[in-house]
Image (cartoon, rainbow, N blue to C red):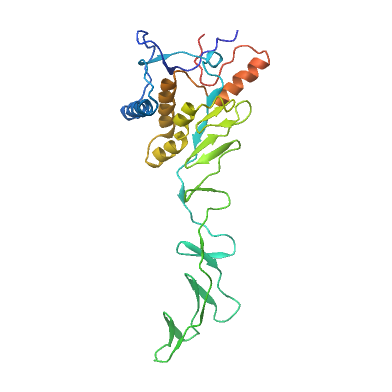
Amino acid sequence: GVPPFSAPKVLYLSDSSRQPEQIAPFSLPLRMFAAIFAMMVTMTTGFEGPSLQVSKSNIGNSTNDTVCWKDSYGRGVGKPIHTCPDGLDKSGALCYPKCRTDVTPTYYGVGPVCWQHCKDGYVDEGALCREKGGIKTYAKSSYGRGAGKPLTCADDEDEDAGLCYKPCKEGYYGVGPVCWESCGGKDPVDGGAICCRDADSCTGKIKALCAGVPIAVAKAILAGDDPSKIAKAAEDAINAVLGYVMPLCKDVELFEAFQGGGVGPVLLPEDNLEL
């Protein structure tokens, strides 16, 4: 038969007398991150509660099934904007219209100015052309080509805060180097790192805790930290302060789809099989 549903172990608030089944394998920096995050929430919300424990829980028994965590994944470190739109030339950090090539000698660009190349038999000396082996000179012809436009990302890249990234897959949006799941379906209300069933579900307390998570994770990645571990530490800290566990939105959708079809117990990808 189908093994029983068994979701991953997660942090929750319980009476301190209960024994933990397993301690999450956080490294010291991540434990510090979670502790500091929880402390900041306590300072700003006035919430105080018992110590953190670890227990099994499944989505069907979640104490809050109207709020869920967005899925996320990294899309690599961004690179500085580097491309000019079609028809423009790059000069420094700006893009300018191409210089004339329909005359002889042709023109070349230096910033906002197009300069004509020297005639055959003359040496280039900046704004002047001097006859080879002689002292005869003449001033180059020049004209302005505008103030220039900023560099952009390539057509197959997304720009975010001056950096270029790979586009996120369908159903996700980018915040720096991280792609976050877009809210929709039964949980259409966006609350930062969470999706809510309706506006009432996205309480001010939850939104205050979660709204800044995507940007915080993006900044942590740029600082060289592991995005998945940092996001998980933040989720665990918020779950602990709120007093209940919020599942991943994609897992809720899968669970509800199977339950609605009368399939019975559902094993999600991260479940531990108990044979």
Question: Which residue is rendered at x = 39% and y = 11% of the image?
Answer: 21
Q: Position of residue 202 (x, y in %)?
A: 53, 27
Q: Position of residue 65 (x, y in %)?
A: 55, 19
Closer-to-camera residue (128/58): 58
Q: Is residue 109 left or right of residue 45?
A: right
Question: Which residue is rendered at x = 35% and y = 11% of the image?
Answer: 16
Residue 210 drawn above or below residue 274? below
Image quadrant in which you'd find residue 221: top left
Q: How many marks?
A: 0
Q: Position of residue 124 (x, y in %)?
A: 43, 81
Quadrant for the N terminus, please.
Answer: top right
Image quadrant in which you'd find residue 216: top left
Residue 129 visible from this viewpoint:
yes
Residue 70 visible from this viewpoint:
no
Q: Position of residue 237 (x, y in %)?
A: 40, 24
Residue 5 drawn above or below residue 91? above
Residue 219 drawn above or below residue 271? below
Closer-to-camera residue (45/130): 45
Q: Is residue 149 left or right of residue 132?
A: right
Closer-to-camera residue (245/2): 245
Question: Which residue is rendered at x = 35% and y = 8% of the image?
Answer: 17
Question: Which residue is rendered at x = 53% and y = 70% of the image?
Answer: 146
Image quadrant in which you'd find residue 25: top left
Q: Is residue 152 left or right of residue 50?
A: right
Q: Residue furthest right?
A: 261
